[in-house]
């Protein structure tokens, strides 16, 4: 298709850009960011990932796109490491199931870290349950080999899959990300029981937990009361261009 040809060009010619959405800890201090890709189209302006990630998945372009995202994110981490105000930040990168299933996945991660000089302990790879479950043994082996470097894995959109929870015991996952559909104001909502359950599950398994899509103070205080320690959402900041993220850093939040 025309869009496919354009996307191929976009990856090659530097039209993709990473936006960064702040993540905060229990005291509200900035602890890290999630990288979210956008396409700066020369005629159509800024295009969001829901408009091109599905096409990239269908056509296999998700592989070069994913490599570009990883390379750019790691280069950004290495640059942030040289500045006092950003040296502590972690960076979360979305990894598609397609990319994770490649036989050279481990090599791609390790060589990219090596080439860019990024500190692996600051990198967080976000996977979804669907990426992990069709071959659990392979997933466990790949995660273990990648984690030798010191990086961490998060389970994105947690709670929206259909899988049994038994697999969680086997996977070396460091963090559960509570899907935003479970983020609510208070205990009367059924979603609240699920959010609480995920927080308890994470604590029981020795994993971190972060809530995404936090939009209001009421949601924040409910999550805090449930023992959630990390947050991401419009209450703190939308995803920001690199320039806007610099402004965010220079303002106390
Ligand atoms: O803001 P937002 O519209 O960025 O992101 C929409 C969805 O697109 C996210 O839920 C995420 O799953 C996906 N996405 C965003 N950035 C990336 C990326 O760099 N790689 C992959 N594989 N998916 C991404
Ligand atoms: O990778 P993932 O599926 O988690 O991508 C996060 C998505 O959620 C992105 O599209 C991002 O723009 C969006 N997002 C981030 N914060 C909020 C929020 O507070 N509310 C809503 N509705 N969406 C958010
Ligand atoms: Mn994500
Ligand atoms: Na998510």
Image (cartoon, rainbow, N blue to C red):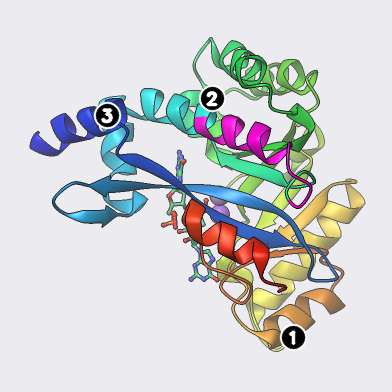
Furthest toward the left, the residue is 2
Q: Nearer the viewer, residue 203 or 252?
A: 252
Q: Which residue is mark 1?
A: 187
Q: Residues within 10 Å of mark 3 (few under 14, many from 20)?
A: few
Q: Residues within 10 Å of mark 1 (few under 14, many from 20)?
A: few
Q: CA distance from mark 2 to mark 1?
A: 37 Å
Assess whether residue 75 is covered by the magenta stretch: yes
Which residue sits at x=33%, y=54%? 48
From the viewer's perspective, is residue 218 above or below residue 55? below
The span picked out in magenta is 72-85
Which residue sits at x=80%, y=46%? 88
Which residue sits at x=84%, y=68%? 26
Residue 233, can we see it? yes
Q: CA distance from mark 3 to mark 1?
A: 49 Å
From the viewer's perspective, is residue 70 above or below residue 247? above
Left or right of 75? Residue 192 is right
Badge number at residue 13: 3
Q: Residue 142: x and y, percent?
A: 67, 18
Secondary structure mostly taken by the magenta-highlighted segment of the chain: helix
Label 3: which secondary element: loop
Label 1: which secondary element: loop
Left or right of 207? Residue 12 is left
**Mark 3 CB lies closer than 8 A to ligand 1:** no
Badge number at residue 100: 2
Q: Nearer the viewer, mark 2 or mark 1?
A: 2
């Amino acid at each position: 298709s025309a869009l496919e040809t354009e996307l191929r060009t976009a990856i090659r010619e530097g039209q993709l850009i990473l936006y960064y959405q702040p993540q905060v800890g229990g005291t509200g201090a900035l602890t890290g960011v999630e990288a979210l890709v956008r396409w700066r189209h020369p005629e159509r302006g800024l295009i969001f990932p829901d408009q091109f990630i599905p096409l990239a998945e269908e056509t296999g372009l998700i592989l070069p796109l994913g490599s570009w995202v990883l390379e750019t994110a790691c280069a950004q981490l290495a640059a942030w490491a040289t500045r006092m105000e950003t040296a502590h930040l972690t960076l979360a990168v979305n990894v598609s199931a397609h990319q994770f299933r490649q036989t050279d996945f481990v090599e791609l991660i390790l060589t990219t870290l090596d080439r860019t000089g990024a500190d692996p302990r600051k990198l967080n790879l976000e996977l979804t349950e669907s990426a992990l479950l069709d071959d659990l043994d392979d997933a466990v082996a790949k995660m273990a080999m990648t984690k030798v470097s010191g990086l961490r894995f998060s389970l994105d959109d947690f709670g929206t899959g259909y899988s049994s929870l038994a697999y969680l015991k086997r996977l070396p996952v460091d963090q559960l990300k509570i899907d935003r559909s479970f983020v609510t104001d208070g205990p009367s909502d059924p979603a609240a029981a699920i959010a609480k359950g995920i927080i308890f599950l994470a604590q029981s398994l020795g994993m971190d937990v972060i809530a995404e899509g936090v939009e209001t103070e009421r949601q924040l205080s409910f999550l805090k009361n449930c023992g959630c320690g990390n947050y991401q959402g419009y209450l703190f900041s939308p995803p920001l261009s690199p320039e806007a993220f610099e402004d965010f850093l220079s303002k106390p939040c």
